[in-house]
Amino acid sequence: MARLRVARGVLGLTGTDSSSPFDNLPDREYQVLWYLGHGYSVREIAEHLRVSVPTVETYCSRLKDKLDCADHADLLKCAIQWAQSSSAL
């Protein structure tokens, strides 16, 4: 987790006064967003994070709410665009 926090800091993805909904995501949601943005399936994300598929689905649901995505396809589109524009680690 420390590496993730450092990477987010280097990319300028931390701060309290941010207007971007991406900036203040908890680490685990940020990780799920990163994996989604890089083409991983929910099952693959669960394997990489060593959690259950329903747990990843919960993170996806929270991300949809926070990022104002209508459905999972919209979340994927958002994640891919974010990954491409931010060069997220």
Image (tube, grey):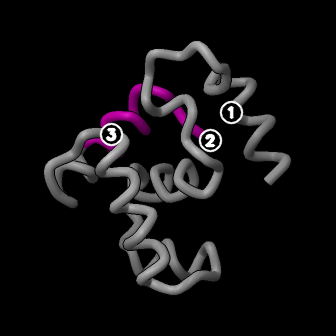
Compared to residue 65, the image places residue 6 above or below, namely above
The furthest residue to the right = 2
Find disc 1 in the rendering and name its residue: 8
Q: Given the image, on which type of amino acid does mark 2 rest?
A: Leu
Mark 2 touches mark 1? (CB < 8 Å): yes
Find disc 3 in the rendering and name its residue: 67
Give percent across and percent down for residue 68. Answer: 25, 40
Q: Main secondary structure of the magenta part?
A: helix
Compared to residue 18, the image places residue 81 above or below, namely below
For image coordinates 40% across by 26% down, the residue present is 85
**Quadrant where the N terminus is found in the figure:** bottom right
Which stretch appears magenta? 78-89
- Which mark sits nearer the N-terminus, 1 or 3? 1
The quarter of the picture where residue 72 lies is: bottom left
For image coordinates 14% across by 49% down, the residue present is 70
Secondary structure category for the residue under label 2: loop
Residue 16, numbered circle: none
Residue 89, numbered circle: 2
Total labels: the figure holds 3
Q: Nearer the viewer, residue 74 or 70?
A: 70
For image coordinates 22% across by 45% down, the residue present is 69
**Quadrant where the C terminus is found in the figure:** top right
In three-dimensional space, the C-alpha distance between marks 3 and 2, rounded to whole angstroms, equals 19 Å
Secondary structure category for the residue under label 3: helix
Q: Viewed as shown, does residue 66 lie left or right of 17?
A: left
Check residue 48 for magenta coloring. Answer: no
- Which mark sits nearer the N-terminus, 2 or 1? 1
Give percent across and percent down for residue 22. Answer: 47, 33
